[in-house]
Amino acid sequence: MSKPKFAMYWSAACGGCEIAVLNIHEGILDVDANFDVVFWPVAMDAKYKDVEAMPDQSITLTLFNGAIRNDENARLARLLRNKSQVLVAFGACACEGGIPGLANLSTPAAILDTAFSTLSTDNPNNLRPQSNYKMPEGEIHIPQMYETVKSLDQVVKVDYYMPGCPPESPQIAAVVGLVIKALKGEAQLPPPGSVIGASGSTVCDECQRARSEKTITAFTRMATFQPRRDQCLLEQGILCSGIATRGGCQALCPNANMPCVGCYGPAPDVIDQGARMMSAVASVIGSKDAPEIEKIMSGIVDPVGTFYRFSLPHSLMRHAKASQQ
Amino acid sequence: MAGNENFEPVIVGFTCNWCSYRAADLAGMSRIKYAPNVRLIRLMCSGRVDPQFVLKALAEGADGVLITGCHPGDCHYVEQNYKTLRRFALLKKTLAALGIEQARVKLIWASAAEGSILAEEIDKMVAEVKALGPLNWKTDGRPTTDDGRIPSSVSRPRSVSEEVPA
């Protein structure tokens, strides 16, 4: 009997998700023992046409990481959707748009300007990448950027969401273990659409710091302030996203004396992570006076980049006005 | 965009049961005429207005959102309108960063006796949003299927959550 097939693909991503998978250590041997790895550009050589040649639904499990930035990403998302029985949005970018999603505050043209016309760039003819270009040897193509960055589920149907930047390795090992058990008929997969490999509560629930009803009169930043290790960071004036973010990481960042950046996406029953952060932050500000409130809030220098650091494309607004022209 | 004489903005208005909703009632009983563009939604308190409500309204077709509540110090629930004040300040900052014009989202205090003030403020806001033109927020961006359609299978909600034991 042939083994079930496994694929992993990266689109607009940094590669950290792949490292996180390798970080399950000897667990990777279980993956190899139980699965036939058919497509994994980072780890083995395979061509898109090899995937195209596979029968539909022939891949048992595909972990798809990265956001949808261009037409190549979208084409591979649709291809792997057709070829896979279970498609997992793996990591913050596939689930929520992630860090690449902050490009939705700008336009592709402005992004290319920044990349190709900075002072330090040697580009005297002000050239830009062209998606189609005629060479003496024939026409060549490079992927074309979409106007906005999308999450995977805005392009194809996703069976499971596995959040995190990257997903924590013990959580990956647990999910892989569950799928192996399910294939042997020893366990059942959760209902489609579930968030897996994460907790059903917030990061605060896993954080060891003491919370009180303390309010603050100024925001501060990590670069200029050494927070206490035993007290809630938000109550010390540090913008910590734990309160609006799904748990599952065992509060890694707060335990290392750094604020939660929100990589596990919106907490259960929260649609818009940034909106929940606005509510939470509003509650911790200790002022009833409009001008004073404005003054305290001037300490929040980048509201979208802070509240929606990983979730802008999957938020209610999805992008800034600039990117819908 | 702007300058369309026939453009009638859609504005979602959140009102507080104890003050601004009654102000709107009073405006009606006093037969004060004001722009009919605001769709009022009665809540028990302006403190009930989750920023998600405002964002959802804007993302799904509203041209503006009006939040109304009791004057500071007069909240039926002691101090929830102060919470509204702080949330609104944050929301304003975030919306500005997303490029949405200030005049589209407004916070107004109106007591139950201030029907004429509420009517005046609504007229003012409708005129301002009219001048800005439709918001027409796109949440689909560029179509992503090969044939140019927006895929029907695209889903947003994630209602179920499952814990996998480590």
Image: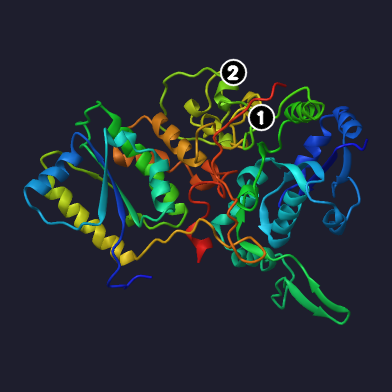
In the image, taking residue B135 as reference, residue A237 lies left or right, namely right
Amino acid on which disc 2 is placed: Gln
In the image, taking residue B3 as reference, residue A133 lies left or right, namely right
Quadrant where the N terminus of chain B sits is bottom left
Secondary element under disc 1, as helix, strand or loop, is loop
Tell me residue B98's x, y (percent). 47, 54
Q: Which residue has dot 1 on it?
A: A190
Given residues B151 and A65, the one toward you in this image is B151
Tell me residue A91's x, y (percent). 69, 40
Mark 2 or 1, which is nearer the eye? 1
Q: Is residue A49 visible?
A: yes
**For the point 44% across and 38% down, which residue is it?**
A278
Q: Residue furthest left?
A: B30
Secondary element under disc 2, as helix, strand or loop, is loop
Q: Quadrant of residue A19?
A: top right
Quadrant where the C terminus of chain B sits is top right
Q: Which residue has dot 2 on it?
A: A208
**Mark sitting earlier along the chain (2/1):** 1
Amino acid on which disc 1 is placed: Pro
